[in-house]
Image (cartoon, grey):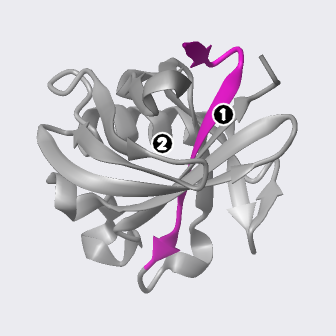
Amino acid sequence: MRVFDERSGECLIFTFKEGLLSAVAHDLQLRVGRFRVEVAEESASVTAEFDPSSLSVVCAMKQGRPAPGALSPSDVRTIEKNIRDEVLESRKHASIRFVSTRATSERVEGRLSLHGRDREIALAVESSDAAKRCEVTLHQPDFGIRPYSAMLGALKVNPDVKIVITLAWSSP
């Protein structure tokens, strides 16, 4: 069995702005700071656990590219607090879990437990000599998550977020 965590992999979340005031807002790249992924190749299974309280802002994004410096340290602290307390409610929902039901070299299917709800999801897998990269788009309301909004909805986060997990992979 192969075991990965934040030292041997990366879990990024991409959020996208919308609403009347979206021109003054930022798309965001977030990082999950604590996680564990177990891959049992012999049984073609994957289990993973992510700590929602460990999310941090990597940077703002502009036109799909990192925009370092676009957020002040105060902005970053406010965003991280809102994600933990208002969006993910990480005190109430302290863990995000995934258990595969089927895994191949191109796709992993399974059950994601997030924010007190379980849903079936499928992740596309891309492989290289050095890494495995999985990507999935999640619709927050499917998990009972109300996307963040401010200013009476004039500024809000799109309900769909993109999750990208990259695991350092080498031949056994």
Q: Which residue is mark 1?
A: 73
CB atoms at circles 2 and 1 under 8 Å apart?
no
Q: Is residue 7 above or below residue 99?
A: above
- State the SS at label 1: helix
Quadrant of the rendered structure where residue 88 is? Answer: top left
Q: Please state which amino acid type lies under the numbered disc 2.
A: Ile
**Closest to the observer, 38 or 53:** 38
**Closest to the observer, 23 or 18:** 18
Query: Residue 93, position in %: x, y?
Result: 19, 27
Nearer the observer: mark 2 or 1; the answer is 2
Query: Residue 151, position in %: x, y?
Result: 32, 69
The mark total stands at 2
Residue at the image position 82 percent from the left and 24 percent from the top: 170
User: In the rendered structure, does residue 24 fall within the stretch colored magenta?
Assistant: no
Where does the C terminus fall, quadrant-wise? top right
User: In the rendered structure, does residue 4 fall within the stretch colored magenta?
Assistant: yes
Residue at the image position 40 percent from the left and 32 percent from the top: 81
Residue 71 appears in the picture as rendered: no
Q: Which residue is mark 2?
A: 79
- State the SS at label 2: helix
Q: Which residues are magenta?
A: 1-18
* Distance between mark 2 and mark 1 Cα atoms: 10 Å
